[in-house]
Amino acid sequence: MSLLASSSAGHVVAAATLSLNPSESALPGGSVIQSLANGIGWWGLIAALVGLVIGAATWALGAHSNNYQHASTGRRAVLVSGAAALVIGAAPAVLSFLFSSGQSVH
């Protein structure tokens, strides 16, 4: 850490070089938090699966009974559930990409 001081007009300017190196072992309980994140991801995928199945059934029943409202609602549920599963699966890679991109900013 470097510290620069200037006393012009009584102002002190401090500049510090900071760094961030995320580590699971840096604090106690890191593995517990990782297990918690894995469990929450699993529950999220189960919810997306249930939403997809219910949405597909609603879409099919609405289409076969010529009920546009139910077919539209079911189709939306299928798309949202699929997008949720995509986001849950891609979250670690997206966050790693964004973090590494942020680390390259100087």
Image (cartoon, grey):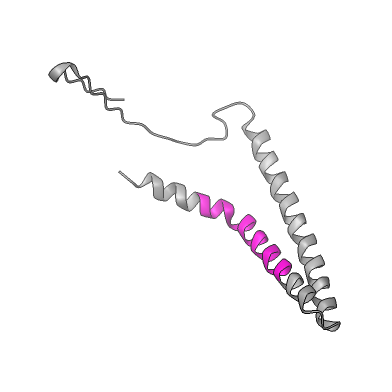
Number of callouts = 0
**Which residues, given as a range, are shown in magenta?**
76-95
Left or right side of 104 for 97: right
What residue sits 85% from the left and 83% below the top? 64
What type of secondary structure mainly makes up the magenta span?
Answer: helix
Residue 80 location in percent, x, y? 68, 64
Residue 51 location in percent, x, y? 77, 62
Name the image quarter holding residue 46.
Answer: bottom right
- Of residue 76 and residue 83, the one placed in the foreground of this image is 76
> From this viewpoint, which residue is outermost toward the left?
8
Quadrant of the image for the C terminus?
top left
With respect to residue 80, does 69 lie above or below? below
What residue sits 64% from the left and 29% below the top? 29
- Of residue 33 and residue 5, the one placed in the foreground of this image is 5
Quadrant of the image for the N terminus?
top left
Residue 18 magenta: no
Left or right side of 91 for 66: right
Residue 83 magenta: yes
Name the image quarter holding residue 74.
Answer: bottom right
What residue sits 80% from the left and 60% below the top? 50
With respect to residue 9, does 34 lie above or below? below
Residue 45 location in percent, x, y? 72, 56
Left or right side of 20 for 67: right
What residue sits 64% from the left and 63% below the top? 83
- Of residue 75 and residue 47, the one placed in the foreground of this image is 75
With respect to residue 23, does 38 lie above or below? below
With respect to residue 35, does 48 lie above or below? below
Residue 13 location in percent, x, y? 23, 23
